[in-house]
Image (cartoon, helix red, strand yellow):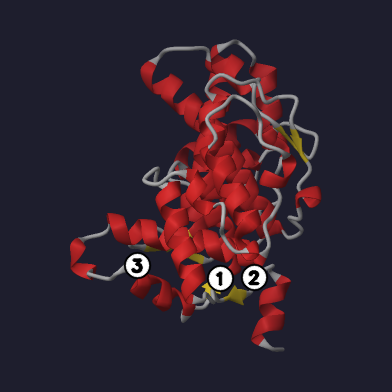
Amino acid sequence: MTLSFMLSLYGSSFAQLKLSAEEMATVKDAFLVYNGEKKESSLTTAPTRFQPFIAQLLASKANNDTMPAEDYFRKPSKDQLLLWYAIRELHYHKSADASSNLTQEQILHQLSNTVIDDRWLLDNYYYRIQSRISMLFNTADLSQHNFQLADLGLNTPVEQAIFVYFITKACGQRLSVMRFTGKGNPKATLDRFPKINGRDYYYFTNFEYPDFEWVGYQKKESYNERHLNSFYELLLNHIEIEISAGEIDKAKQIYRNSILSKPDLFKYSKSEKALVDLHKKWQ
């Protein structure tokens, strides 16, 4: 069994970014637009290859209360994902300790010689556009929006999980702020969450993929320990909100239909003891 075949079983493969000198200049311009340091008009003459990527980037910077079109959420092409990854690397190096002393050209050349995991590419894309949805969700009711994961080109368990982490974190951040400050109506906020495959977010339980090493900002970590942990925190918050509102039956419904009732995944949560205690109480 070849490595590429084994990886394909889990929806994972590897890719490299190849850029001409002209294309490198376009990536640098795109990075400045992404950071708000250059006008969007600087990208109007970009090569044809960059047009879908630029459309995504401009949509991520849009300052309005309109939900982006479905194409914005669909899994991009490999080429587009690689261009977004270049934005990530330029951003990380700009934020890193100055001891790296790499120019943008050196960073992009280095990237062109680096083989990148597809899972990292997809995670990075959704992370880069997350702030747009977070800002929108501050006031918008997204409950009428339904994300059919297969229609978005997300065909493997890991791809679908990555999207679920993205959309629930984008919306869940507002909930966390409310619970921290004690202001607002957390229960009403939960009612504004978008649907996933036609159902409330907690019904998504297909996290049956092998955990993998993921490189965040200057450190490597378990992907599940970072993201499944956050998903569990959202679920626990949801349960507590329902119980506080006297909705015990609703809280138990969430427990039964979510990964709160799947002890095999508890090890990825920092709240493992709370999950075990809840499971013992309600199983």
Q: Are marks 2 and 1 in contact (CB under 8 Å)?
A: yes
Neighbours of disc 2 within 10 Å: few (<14), some (14-19), many (20+): some
Q: Position of residue 247 (x, y in %)?
A: 64, 14
Q: Residues within 10 Å of mark 1 (few under 14, many from 20)?
A: some
The residue beneath circle 3 is 104
Marks 3, 1: nearer the viewer: 3
Label disc, if present, on residue 117 of the rendered structure:
1
Q: CA distance from mark 3 to mark 1?
A: 22 Å
Give the mark nearer the N terminus: 2 vs 1: 2
SS under mark 3: helix
Mark 3 touches mark 1? (CB < 8 Å):
no
Q: Quadrant of residue 18?
A: bottom right
Tell whether 130 sits left or right of 203: left
Q: CA distance from mark 3 to mark 2?
A: 28 Å
Q: Quadrant of the N terminus?
A: bottom right
Mark sitting earlier along the chain (3/2): 2
Q: Nearer the viewer, mark 3 or mark 2?
A: 3
Mark 1 belongs to which amino acid?
Asp
- The residue closer to the viewer here, 204 or 98, is 98
Closer to the chain start, of discs 3 and 1, is: 3
Viewer-proximal residue, 172 or 210? 172
Q: Position of residue 105 (x, y in %)?
A: 36, 72
Does 219 sit above or below residue 236? below
Q: Residue at x 60, y 61 (%)?
A: 50
Residue 139 horizontal/vertical position (percent): 56, 19
- Relative to 140, residue 230 above or below: below
Residue at image coords 65%, 32% = 255
Identify the amino acid type marked 3: Gln
- The tally of labels here is 3
Question: Which residue does the numbered mark 2 point to in the structure image?
Answer: 12
